[in-house]
């Protein structure tokens, strides 16, 4: 097992067994049968381990979704749906730790922007930018002045909403979370796609230019 992965696994197990992180990095290094200096080669704090865990959940979900043979043939809407469903599956396999870590974060998360989630946010925003660009190319998403550039951030806020919803979801097999994913993604793409407003604006432009 890769050393960084072993460190993360041992940290998660300790937190779940004791309900809190180890007393110190020294104590944690001792548990790992490493020197404190060796541990610093991988992580500099428990917070940095939390950061790596959150972004690893994202990376695992993205990789799993994109490795599905049907993924590349999906529309952008379907790709985001596939990512979210896969991400929730990854979270489910780590639910005890995810709920513990999430509940420690300052609320509201969107406003506080806690450091534990920043690498996850950066990676997700990059992914969302790629999806939005693909959506404009395929005309699933309409480019709108001053608004289009904010789409990735809006999708990130939706991600935080779904995370909060899933943590609090008590439905069987988290069925309500699946419904929340479907409804929020479909609504987002309905808003980002061509709408009646766009048609009216185009008509107004045409009338103005040909008066």
Image: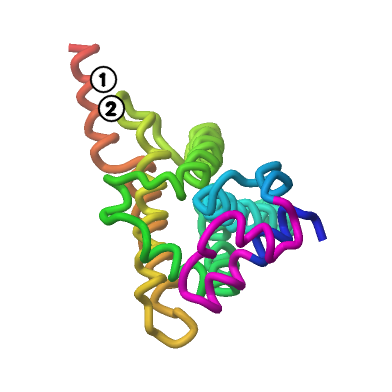
Q: Is residue 159 among what the camera can see?
A: yes
CA neighbours of label 1 inside 10 A, class few (<14), some (14 to 19), many (20+):
few
Residue shown at the point (72%, 52%) measured from the top left: 35
Where residue 90 appears, x then y in whole percent?
59, 67
Left or right: residue 115 compared with residue 208? right
Where residue 125 appears, x then y in whole percent?
48, 39
The residue labelled by disc 2 is 202
Residue nearest the viewer, comparing 86 with 82 = 86
Residue shown at the point (59%, 58%) measured from the top left: 57
Q: CA distance from mark 1 to mark 2?
A: 6 Å
Q: Residue lying farthest bottom?
A: 172
Where residue 14 appears, x then y in whole percent?
58, 71
**The N terminus - image quarter:** bottom right
The residue labelled by disc 1 is 206
The overriding secondary structure of the stretch rendered in magenta is helix
CA neighbours of label 2 inside 10 A, class few (<14), some (14 to 19), many (20+):
few
Quadrant in the rendering for residue 13: bottom right
Question: Pointer 1 and pointer 2: residues touching (CB < 8 Å)?
Answer: yes
| Element type at mark 1 | helix
Tag of residue 44? none
| Element type at mark 2 | helix
Residue nearest the viewer, comparing 10 with 55 = 10
Residue shown at the point (72%, 53%) measured from the top left: 4
Where residue 42 appears, x then y in whole percent?
68, 45
The boundaries of the magenta stretch are: 11-35
Q: Is residue 74 among what the camera can see?
A: no
Left or right: residue 126 compared with residue 196? right
Q: Please, is residue 173 above or below residue 146 in the view?
A: below
């Amino acid at each position: 097992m890769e050393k960084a992965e072993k460190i993360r696994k041992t940290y998660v197990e300790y937190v779940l067994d004791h309900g809190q992180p180890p007393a110190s990095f020294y104590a944690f290094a001792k548990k790992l049968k490493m020197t404190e200096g060796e541990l610093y080669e991988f992580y500099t704090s428990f917070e940095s381990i939390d950061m790596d865990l959150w972004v690893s959940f994202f990376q695992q979900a993205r990789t799993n979704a994109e490795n599905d043979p049907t993924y590349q043939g999906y529309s952008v809407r379907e790709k985001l749906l596939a990512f979210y469903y896969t991400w929730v599956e990854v979270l489910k396999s780590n639910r005890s730790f995810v709920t513990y870590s999430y509940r420690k974060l300052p609320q509201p998360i969107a406003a506080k922007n806690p450091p534990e989630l920043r690498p996850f946010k950066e990676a997700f925003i990059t992914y969302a930018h790629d999806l939005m660009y693909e959506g404009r190319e395929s005309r699933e998403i309409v480019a709108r002045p001053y608004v289009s550039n904010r789409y990735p951030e809006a999708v990130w806020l939706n991600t935080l909403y779904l995370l909060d919803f899933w943590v609090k979801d008590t439905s069987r097999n988290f069925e309500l979370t699946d419904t929340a994913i479907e409804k929020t993604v479909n609504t987002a793409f309905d808003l980002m796609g061509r709408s009646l407003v766009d048609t009216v604006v185009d008509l107004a432009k045409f009338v103005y230019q040909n008066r």
